[in-house]
Image (cartoon, rainbow, N blue to C red):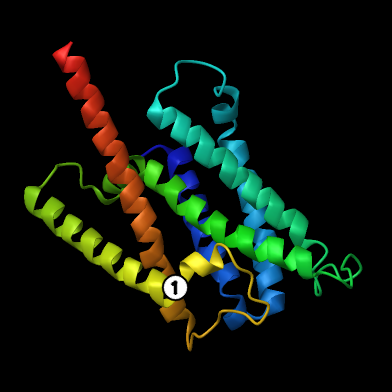
Amino acid sequence: MNRNIAIRLVIDLTMTILMLVAMAYHITGNTIHEVVGVCLFLLFIVHNILNRKWYKAIAKGKYNIRRILSITVNLLFLMSIVTIVISSLPISSDLLPFVSVNNDMIWREIHVLTSYWAFILMAVHIGMSWRTIINAVGKMSGITQTSRIRTIILRFIAVMIVVYGVQTSFDREMSSKLTIYNPFGWGTDDSFLRFLIDHLAIMGIYISGTHYVLKFVQRKKVEKTGKK
């Protein structure tokens, strides 16, 4: 397996875990939240450096639905991370207490709302690269041959994750978290494990949805090309 791809997978997996840890503010506390935020930002910089060729190629080549969606999602994700970092400076109370401001409510609102949108965009971003991720994992595990039974089992698991994710989205009021800032917090978890499982399931909705929508678009494109 290509070493660069392996490094990117490790970095992306680490970033995903750190994003979830950062969102579990009500469980970890502020100090861990800020430290994890710094680590996440540094890895985000490394991630973009490793993928710098993508930025150079934006203005080149032809545009199709997949590419337009990819550029839109990636740029929105970039903007959301930058906004999270900028808004974190005035509300930092542990790592950067000398930067914090007294009337920080607007900054907290921007920080929290943007974080939830970044969470969704991250899941869509992963979904757009899901085929590449699966192929890379397959090579790492030595599984290179397709199996109908394995495919059926994996799709069944994906459906179960999505069903649980939809239920969890309602239970955790995700729609409200994307539109309303709650100064008293949304935390009701007894453990980080429950928080992790629920939010991974919510990510599963957008990962699976994005992956299969792109597969449908690709299939229609092939059918249209074949008819011509």
Quadrant of the drawing holding the C terminus: top left
Q: Residues within 10 Å of mark 1 (few under 14, many from 20)?
A: some
The residue lying at 21 percent from left, 30 percent from top is 219
The residue lying at 26 percent from left, 66 percent from top is 163
Relative placement, left or right, of 88 versus 5 is right
Q: Amino acid at mark 1?
A: Leu
Q: Is residue 118 above or below residue 71?
A: below
Q: Residue furthest bottom?
A: 190
Give residue 100's position: percent from left, percent from top.
87, 68
Relative placement, left or right, of 81 versus 117 is right
Q: Quadrant of residue 226?
A: top left
Residue where numbered disc 1 is placed:
196
Q: Find numbered disc 1 in the image and state the secondary structure of the residue it sits on.
A: helix
Q: Quadrant of residue 106?
A: bottom right
Q: Residue furthest left?
A: 149
Relative placement, left or right, of 157 versus 35 is left
Relative placement, left or right, of 228 versus 76 is left
Q: Residue furthest right?
A: 98
Give residue 46's position: percent from left, percent from top.
62, 45
Give residue 13's position: percent from left, percent from top.
47, 56
The residue lying at 55 percent from left, 62 percent from top is 178
Quadrant of the drawing holding the N terminus: top left
